[in-house]
Amino acid sequence: MKTKIESNEDYHANKRYISSSGIKKIHRKSVYHYINDLPFTSSSMQLGTLIHTAVLEPEKLADEYYVMPKVDKRTKAGKEDYAMHVERAKDKIIIDDSMVEVKDKIVKNFLANEDAVKYTKGAIELSHYTELMDVPVKVRPDCYNKELGFISDPKTCQDNSPKAFKRDVFKYGYHLQAAFYSDALGVDPKNFIFIAIETNHPYSVQCYSLSDEMIEFGREDYQSALLKWKKYLDTNIVTAYDGYETNEKGIIIL
């Protein structure tokens, strides 16, 4: 096991090791889709990143974000004012007052939740490099407390009720991530804590762990994906939708 303090960009740039996001892409789609994946962002992802910083590393907010005041870009003066603020922002992420308002309400509820605060006390975003099933893998947990033996991961969502968040777990492969991270770091997967944070009123914050059944589903899924990735590493053959039943002509049967 090798542990490094590095930027998120450097972590993702290291292609020798495969991460949880890569494993999830192979599980949901294929090795071909993972290799040809393109960067993607959205407003909801930007809000999620903002909340992530606000609850885990609030001291970085001023250095990483720039709040854009309201300007009327329909006027010449407004356009000039906007351009001036963009120049001031430089490499910072530009956000508006509405995002700041949401962030502030979420942080207030987060700090009032004793479990959420408790499970964000640890090493924040340290990169770990190791092997699973003879495959080089990497994990970068949001929060890892080695002494207390837990990993936590704040997740923003529209609805953090038990039924809704359980659907999100399967939809986004959170169970796969929990098993993958836990096995890589030698942590009991029951101590992988999700902090589900609603991004709309009333901005509820709720902590969850996974059942034995969901953990085993996640382990089976990540191991299946790792086998596909290992096959690619061993043969250099890129496969799409591998593992499905085919007819005598090699056509996938649905």
Image: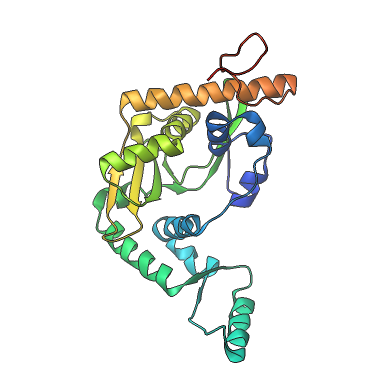
Q: In this rendering, would 6 be left or right of 67?
A: right
Residue in the image at 46% along x and 27% along y: 183
Q: Quadrant of the N terminus?
A: top right
- The percent position of residue 92, horizontal first and vertical second, equals 58, 68
Q: Is residue 136 above or below residue 154?
A: above
Quarter-wise, where is residue 127 in the image?
Answer: top right
Viewer-closest of 244 and 47: 244
Residue in the image at 43% along x and 74% along y: 97
Q: In this rendering, would 149 be left or right of 237?
A: left
Q: Is residue 201 above or below residue 187?
A: below
The structure's colour scheme is rainbow
Viewer-closest of 160 and 252: 252
Check the image and name the residue furthest to the top: 248
Viewer-closest of 156 and 139: 156
Q: Is residue 130 above or below residue 245?
A: below
- The percent position of residue 150, horizontal first and vertical second, equals 37, 38
Quarter-wise, where is residue 218 in the image?
Answer: top left
Residue in the image at 67% along x and 45% along y: 13
- The percent position of residue 192, horizontal first and vertical second, equals 37, 36
Residue in the image at 48% along x and 42% along y: 141
